[in-house]
Amino acid sequence: MVTRADIGVIGGSGFYSLLDDAEEIELATPYGPPSDVVTVGRIGSRSVAFIPRHGRDHRFPPHRIPYRANLWALRSLGVRQVLAPSAVGSLRADYGPGTMVIPDQLIDRTSGRVQTYYDTGGAVHVSFADPYCPSGRAAAADTARATDWHTADAGTLVVIEGPRFSTRAESRWFAANGWSIVGMTGFPEAILARELALCYTSLCLVTDLDAGVETGQGVTHDEVLEFFAQNVTRMRSLVSATVQALPEERTCPCGSALDGLKLPFDLP
C-alpha cells in the first residue's frame, strides 16, 4: 500500500524535521531525487509529508535545490496543499526580527534556475498573477495572530539568486520599490507548485533587517541560523497548527490552475 499525504511542508534553513512518529520514504522523480528522504506522518487528523528544502545536512545552497523534484515528489504522494516556512530578511524597519510575514506577492530576481516543468512538448502558460493560495494565506495569518506572532498578512517577497546576501545598494533599491522581505528560495518553488495545481503558502520568519535598512556590517549566515534556531520550536508549532487549520476541501482557484491547458505529460 502506497503511503499518501494530503499536505506537504517544505522546511527552510534550520527547519530540518517536523514529524516525530513518521515513515521515511525514498522517492525517485523524473527530475532526480528530492532534497532528502520524505517523511510522512500525521498532525492531528491530517496526513503530512515533510521535505527539508536544503537537505537535513544543509547540503543544497539556494540555487542548487532540486525544486522540481521536491514538488513532484509531494504531488506523487497525494499532496495538494503545501506550506513553505523560510527565513527572510526584512526590507522594512517595522518588520523586525520575529515578525511572521505571509506574503501575497512575489518578485523574481533569480537567474539561471529552471522554473518550469513544461520546457518540452509544447508551451504551457500558467496564470501567476496571484502566486499564493488565498485559503492557505488566510489560515496561516489567522493561526499566527492567534498564537501571538507579530504578523503581517500581506507583503511582497523578493527572491534573489544567492547564495550571497544583498549589497546595501540592492537592499535599498528593493525597499524603495515597496517590497517587504527578501529571501533566496521562494522562487521557483511557488511557480512549480502552481504548475502542478498545488496550493502554496509561504510562512516567512524575519530573522534580520536586510543590509540597506540599518547601518552596520550587514547580515551573516551564522546570525540567520542562530536566530532561526532560537525560534524553530515555536515555528514548528505554528506550522503544525496551520496544517490543522487548512481547509479539508479546496475551494480556492489553485486546483483549477491547469484547466483548459494541454499538458505534454500526465501529472502524478
Image (cartoon, rainbow, N blue to C red):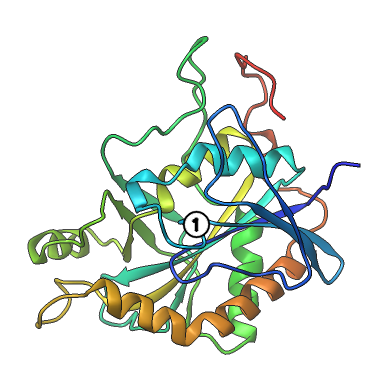
Q: Quadrant of residue 244?
A: bottom right
Q: Residue at x 22, y 72 (%)?
A: 210
Quarter of the image with the C terminus in it: top right
Q: Quadrant of residue 59?
A: bottom left
Name, please, the residue furthest toward the top: 121
Quarter of the image with the N terminus in it: top right
Can residue 130 be seen here? The reply is no
Q: Nearer the viewer, residue 19 or 251?
A: 19
How crowded pointer 1 is (Cα within 10 Å; few <14, some 14-19, many 20+) is rated as: many
**In this image, 215 relative to 38: left or right?**
left
Q: Nearer the viewer, residue 216 or 95?
A: 216
For the residue labelled by badge 1, is the local secondary structure a helix, a strand or a loop?
loop
Q: Quadrant of residue 177?
A: bottom left
Can residue 46 be seen here? The reply is yes
Q: Residue at x 40, y 64 (%)?
A: 155
- Judge whether 112 appears above or below 138 on screen: above
Residue 221: where, in percent of width, then height? 27, 71
- Judge whether 242 appears above or below 227 on screen: above
Q: Nearer the viewer, residue 224 or 186?
A: 224
- Judge whether 70 appears above or below 61 on screen: above
Which residue corresponds to mark 1?
A: 55
**Amino acid bearing label 1:** Gly
Residue 84: where, in percent of width, then height? 54, 59
Residue 95: where, in percent of width, then height? 34, 79
Q: Residue at x 78, y 51 (%)?
A: 5
- Judge whether 188 appears above or below 159 on screen: above
Q: How many marks?
A: 1
Q: Residue at x 69, y 26 (%)?
A: 267
Residue 45: where, in percent of width, then height? 87, 67
